[in-house]
Image (tube, rainbow, N blue to C red):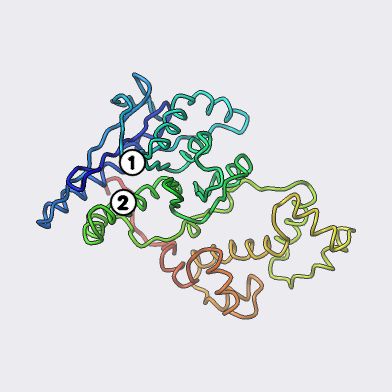
Amino acid sequence: MSPSSPLRVGVLAFPGCFASEVYGVPDLLAMASHVSAANGTPRPGYEISVVSPRLRVIASGGSSLDVRAVRPVDVLIVPGFEPPPAGGLDAALAALAPETAVIRAQAASGTAVVSICVGAYLLAEAGLLAGRRATTSWLYADRFARRYTDVRLLRESLFVTDRGVTTTAAFSAMYDFALQLIRQHDGPGVARSTARIALVDDARSTQAPYVEPALVPTAGGDFSLGVKRRLDRDIAARYDLSGLAREFHVSTRTLLRRFGDEAGESPLTYLHKARVRRARHLLETTDRTVAAIAAEVGYRDAGTFGGIFTRHTGQRPREYRARFRRRHDRRGGVGPA
């Protein structure tokens, strides 16, 4: 691409794709072009096209998309879709074989390929993610990791670029990617102003604080689920591996092996996650001090708790509270008073 030419951005539309993810990045790029022009330093801008190997595309919610034939682009964006239950995923992906072929061909020609949310499934099906680092929506991360074992999944990342292939987390992470593209194409000042105009957070670094553990499918068999219930029941108790093993009538070595095989982590790792989950709830809904919350979930030292909490959420406890505190005020709903 010539420096004086617009950046050619193609969005690959397909049946059932999220329409908002088809237009989200292009809309933010259009804003950036206006900001750049208003600043008196217009850049070549962006040439946007919605492309498909099909003549007609019906997106999620029944929206009909106006599409053009696939053409050479500099960046190809693959939106997400709603994954069917596990039993239907193979058939759903097989039905998108024409799109998978387009992704594979575009990547082979040197096009930078980007997936939004679970669009990562299509990139993986096209063979683009094997041996690469990637991310996807936290809600489907476990399912994705089990299906594509050759992908190094970075579950907490908002977006990951590895050798010309970019994957993003769920929905709004498309804006994190778009702002990065704007920074590279138009400069940090334009990206910052565009974020302000669109009310988009341009300072996020991880999706970890947004994970809702109750919505994540529980991994494990009967043995590990029993251990998890025991740890959840006495979440603040001192971690005693030997005592835990005695309760389940196994050796400590057997407990660690069976739990690890079923749950994919150690009991202590699970306990830390459970404690952080409880602490998040208390930070969101109570006025208790961080030290009091630390003690309530099983940490005698608030500093130790703070380190573990930050490692799991990407934010310090007070930062998390400031962002996610549920304020019980008297404001009404969205309708007329």
Q: Which mark is residue 44?
A: none
Percent from the top left, x then y, of residue 193?
A: 22, 58
Residue that label 1 marks = 75
Position of residue 240 relative to residue 157, above or below, is: below
Percent from the top left, x then y, of residue 254?
A: 85, 58
Percent from the top left, x then y, of residue 104?
A: 45, 33
What residue is rendered at 67% in x and 63% in y? 269
Quadrant of the snapshot with the N terminus: top left
Structural distance between the alpha carbons of marks 1 and 2: 10 Å
- In the picture provided, is 213 more to the left or to the right than 182? right
The kind of secondary structure element at disc 1 is strand
Query: Disc 2 marks which amino acid?
Result: Leu
What residue is rendered at 36% in x and 53% in y? 176
Q: Nearer the viewer, residue 221 or 336?
A: 221
Query: Disc 1 marks which amino acid?
Result: Val
The kind of secondary structure element at disc 2 is helix
Percent from the top left, x then y, of residue 50?
A: 30, 31
Residue that label 2 marks = 181
